[in-house]
Amino acid sequence: MTREQTYPWGTARRYNSYTDWFTSYFGKRVQKVSINAGFTCPNRDGSIGYGGCAYCTNEAFIPAYCIPDSSVTEQIEKGIAFHRKRYRRADSYLAYFQAYTNTYAGIDRLKSLYEEALCHPAVTGLVIGTRPDCVSSELLDYLAQLARDRFVTVEYGIETVSDVTLKRINRGHTFADAVRAVAETSGRGIRTGAHLIFGLPGESRSQITASAEVISSMPVNILKIRQLQLITGTVMAKEFRDKPEEFDLYSPDDYISLVISFLERLNPAIMIDRISGESPPRMLDDPRSWSLRSNEILQLFAQRLEERETWQGRLFKPGL
């Protein structure tokens, strides 16, 4: 393929951009507004464990306006005001239930929270972040009903395809749980997203690259990838200080190369929403000096794809 030619997703961009699809789907500017509805996680409250994921501090990525003491409606209003001040005004918003496990409650409470968000006149749909072991058939049936006339996406924190790593980072679920949840969600016609972390301890670059074939076999619509970041006060930050030899912390160039190697083997039908994460510098306990913002990483990524004359799915082998 040449630069002038289009790729399987119909654009000249060398990866299947979720942003492009999203803009085309809505035909107008739509912004996600984050909500902290006061959930917890089963590996925090003792249901399956304590302490949460070894790398996790939700405060590292939740906007300041997300205060669980405020109602869903109040958080939406504050979020809209925040975005109008910081960015250009959107025409509509998606209520993004982001903090912790946003399906970890009884069905009546979940319905109440989701429907409160959908009742806001500026909200056109839901994005729900959760764990693959915290969805029920009853909930998925309900979300499938909502998805008939509203925009609904369920995003699963898969993080890795390795059960060894999942145990090490205290996730409390298996990769088989992720396979089941994604299949059951997609099978009901609900748009399905997945999150992966590159750089978890014990995982080699070749293992990460090879995992593209596993993810490609799943009915995932949207993929978010981010590098491991060491957040102050987390178990993983302490582990790094104790045993740094067990970690492979990438430079931006190394990380971009790894993402490209992964995406070359990834199903071209999977849309890429994000390829890196960004936490407030004040919260990082990380020896790397990534001075680049996520948008700058994305620009370098697109540049490297052109320099290497490659694209998402170039080495993808259907049926594997």
Image: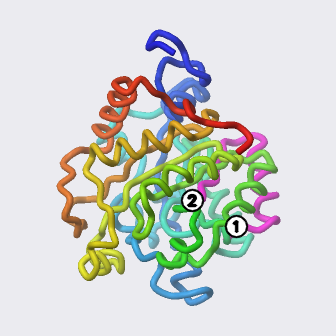
Secondary structure category for the residue under label 2: strand
Residue 166 position, x and y percent, is 54, 72
Residue 76 position, x and y percent, is 48, 53
Q: How many marks?
A: 2
Q: Which mark is residue 176?
A: 1
Residue 100 position, x and y percent, is 51, 69
What residue sits right under mark 2 in the picture?
Answer: 129
- Using the rendered image of the protein, determine whether residue 280 is visible from the camera's viewpoint: yes
**Which one is nearer the viewer's eye here, 131 or 176?**
176
Mark 1 Cα-neighbour bin, 10 Å: few <14, some 14–19, many ≥20: some
Residue 122 position, x and y percent, is 54, 41
Q: In this view, does 195 lie above or below 58?
A: above
Q: Do labels 1 and 2 touch, CB within 8 Å?
A: no
Mark 2 Cα-neighbour bin, 10 Å: few <14, some 14–19, many ≥20: many
Kind of residue indicated by mark 1? Ala
Instruction: Read off the magenta span.
Output: 134-157
Secondary structure category for the residue under label 1: helix
Residue at horizontal 45%, vertical 34%?
90
- Find the distance from the CA under tag 1 to the CA under tag 2: 18 Å
Residue at horizontal 58%, vertical 48%?
120
Q: Is residue 97 above or below residue 188?
A: below
Taking the magenta stretch, the answer to whether it contains residue 147 is: yes
Which of the 4 image quarters holds residue 246?
bottom left
Left or right: 279 as drawn, with respect to 102: left
* Mark 1 / mark 2, whichever is N-terminal: 2
Which of the 4 image quarters holds residue 22?
top right
- Using the rendered image of the protein, determine whether residue 119 is visible from the camera's viewpoint: no
Kind of residue indicated by mark 2? Gly
Taking the magenta stretch, the answer to whether it contains residue 64 is: no
